[in-house]
Amino acid sequence: MNYLYLIIILLISFFNPLFAENSANKIKFLLGQFKPEKHSEFVNLKQSIIPVARDNLYLKKEVVEQLEKLYKQLKHDIPDAKFWITSATRSYWHQKQIWEKKWEKYKKLYKHNNQKIAQKILEYSSMPGTSRHHWGTDFDINILQNDYYNKDNGKKIYEWLKKNAMKYGFCMPYNEGRLQGYQLEKWHWSYYKLAKQYQKEWNQYFKNNYFDIYIDFKGKEFFKKYAYIYVNSINEECK
Ligand SMILES: [Zn+2]
């Protein structure tokens, strides 16, 4: 037997399952189907200088490093600024709980019209598997109300972030003036340098229907119709 032929056969059989496994891991990562506390690239914010609202908030290591730099500069520029992280990485299973709880809440109100229920939840909440919070790049700060950022401390930090966050790789994905997607969220920020790559990969897997066997939640029949629009209707500065 030709040795070259044998080597090729061996290489194919060795790399094929490996490739399949890597690809499954990537899909699970993009959908948030992993535990950040067990993921080697994630850091607990308790181990950083950044104030947190509660325990067990995780972000990717590079994101925490950049966020620490941003925080130091913010405190230098506005010493009395109060800035903290309220929410960070959220798993697919957590998002499914949020989604299905809202589904129950709106079921009667919208007389079991599933499309209307889905549209209502999508004003502020993502379908499981479509949240930027899955990627370890996105987080919510301080208070989850737009009004909070119109005066006092909220206004101070919001205006500072709008001017400076970009220098550290951060942007606000759900800004004003978009024609589709989620409502304005002044509290949600993203490390777009990593997130834009994940978003591209998410789109590729989505278009090739790779996610279908991984997702299961109430109203999942609307995944095809809405997921792509909501993932991609973001601030141009984050792309
Ligand atoms: Zn958020």
Image: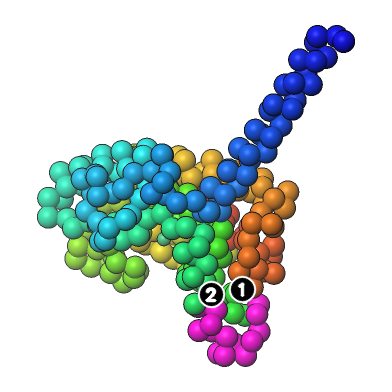
Asked whether 46 falls inside the magenta stretch, the response is no
* Residue 168 coordinates in the image, percent (x, y): 34, 40
Q: Is residue 97 left or right of residue 66?
A: right
The amino acid beneath tag 1 is: Lys
* Residue 65 coordinates in the image, percent (x, y): 31, 38
- Spatial CA distance of label 2 from label 1 is 6 Å
Residue 219 lies, with reference to residue 62, above or below; the image says below
Residue 170 in view: no
| Front one among 8 and 202 | 8
Image quarter where ligand 1 lies: bottom left
Which portion, as a residue range, is magenta?
A: 102-115
Q: At 17% across and 47% down in the image, what residue appears?
A: 75
Please give the residue where the numbered disc 1 appears in the rendered image.
Answer: 218
Q: At 24% across and 44% down in the image, what residue appears?
A: 48
Q: At 35% across and 50% down in the image, what residue appears?
A: 58
* Residue 183 coordinates in the image, percent (x, y): 48, 68
* Label 2 or label 1, whichever comes before in sequence order: 2
Secondary structure at numbered mark 1: loop
Secondary structure at numbered mark 2: helix
Please give the residue where the numbered disc 2 appears in the rendered image.
Answer: 100
